[in-house]
Amino acid sequence: MPEPVLIAVPPKGGSFDDVLKKLVQLGWLKPELVAHLRRLIKEDKRRVKFEEGLIDLWNDHKGDADATVRAADRAGHDLGDVETAMARMRRWTGPDGRSRLGYTPMEGVQALLSQWLCDPDSDVREAALCLHLQLDITRPGKPVRAVFNQCDFTWKGHRGVLMGTEHEVTPTCLRKHKRDLSLTCYDAFHNTLLDVLDTGKVRNWQELRAHLSGEASQVRILGSLGLDDYLGHCVLMDRARGERIRAMGASRRWADSTADPKLAELRGAPVLIDPMYLELYGSVIDAAALGLRFEAGPKDIERVCAEEGRTAIYIVRSGSTVALMPNLCVVGEEIITSETIVAANATSLERNPAVAALVDSLAPSATDHAPAWRAKLAKKLGEKLI
């Protein structure tokens, strides 16, 4: 029997949802399985957010359990849910002698997953078998989360395995032939392909494909998956700073030259970013040469920009958060754009007919969605887009 095609997909989040919905449309996956997979992962994400809120209340009330429960009740949470969560969450004593509350430990989350694995509904059990537990190292407190692990499928006689793979390691897995195909976001590719690009100043997957060395890399960028998941890494500022930039009359593109007058607004203090994109931003806008510094941003990065006069480069999708945050603006064009793309290992694509057949089913598109996305963003933000 031929080896299955190994396909990297996101392990969680909106991109995961969009990719799975696409695969249902193509007939690769059963809709019932996907519906339960999405529900279970979102249910566990809500658990983590709920526990995060309880931890904040606990700290606000100096470790008083009864006061925490009363505060959660006043906030509208079900008392039964509050008591159940607090009973399973981690407790310990801090250096100051005060009781601390933390996220549910591994054994507690494993018990929740075991309940799904014993569900009377066979589709729920099948979905639960596709999950595993993972430490979320991006969130303070490092909660354990249920995320997608893997799922086997057969489509028109071709065997495939969807594998939940973190965005940042996907290109490396393709290069080392640990995956045959990838259905993940473009912005994960840039950092790990710098050594096989003739320039780091590429702002979307089309430019990356044009500058990628086919001889030095096994990665082949085949096109867009055609999902409605376009996003931009945009510069966020408060309105006063944004209006100063508007008054300059400069181009809307950032760092299109060393003489860009807008850059003065970025040099006064470090620009807040998600640290995983440090190398990407540094290469795209040549930060070292332009005297720009970056700093890891807080969880509430939008509020910090709006209320404390800081600048950030941050992911903007629909613009809903910016639209709702008073005094917050998107300034200029996006630094880079991203969307879910289809990529393959060159050897797999050449030698395995199943890979080529699955790629044909995916029908990667060469369409540039940037103009349509920018138009929708402009409509949503109005004067908040400067």
Image (tube, rainbow, N blue to C red):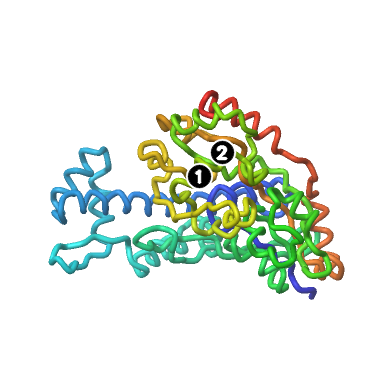
Viewed as shown, does residue 271 lie left or right of 361? left
Compared to 126, does 330 lie above or below? above
Give the crowd class for mark 2: few <14, some 14-19, many >=20 residues within 10 Å: many
Per the rendering, the mark at residue 208 is: none
| Front residue of 222 and 82 | 222
Residue at coordinates 62% horizontally, 32% vertically from top-left? 250
Residue 107 appearing in the image? yes
- Quadrant where the N terminus sits is bottom right
User: Of the residues shown, which amino acid type is indicated by label 1?
Assistant: Leu
| Front residue of 368 and 245 | 245
Proximity of marks 2 and 1: CB atoms separated by less than 8 Å: yes
User: Of the residues shown, which amino acid type is indicated by label 2?
Assistant: Lys
Per the rendering, the mark at residue 262 is: 2
Residue at coordinates 43% horizontally, 61% vertically from top-left? 145
Which structural element holds mark 1?
helix
Image coordinates of residue 377 in percent, x first then y, are 59, 31
Image coordinates of residue 169 in percent, x first then y, are 61, 66
Viewed as shown, does residue 342 lie left or right of 272? right
Residue 231 appearing in the image? no
Give the crowd class for mark 1: few <14, some 14-19, many >=20 residues within 10 Å: many
- Quadrant where the C terminus sits is top right
> In this figure, which residue is indicated by the disc labeled 1?
266
In the orientation shown, which residue stands out farthest toward the front?
A: 259
Q: Residues under labels 2 and 1: Cα distance?
A: 7 Å
Viewed as shown, does residue 359 lie left or right of 377? right
Image coordinates of residue 337 in percent, x first then y, are 65, 45
In which quadrant of the rendered view does residue 93 lie? bottom left
Image coordinates of residue 12 in percent, x first then y, are 53, 55
Residue at coordinates 13% horizontally, 66% vertically from top-left? 97
Residue at coordinates 53% horizontally, 65% vertically from top-left? 129
| Front residue of 324 and 36 | 324
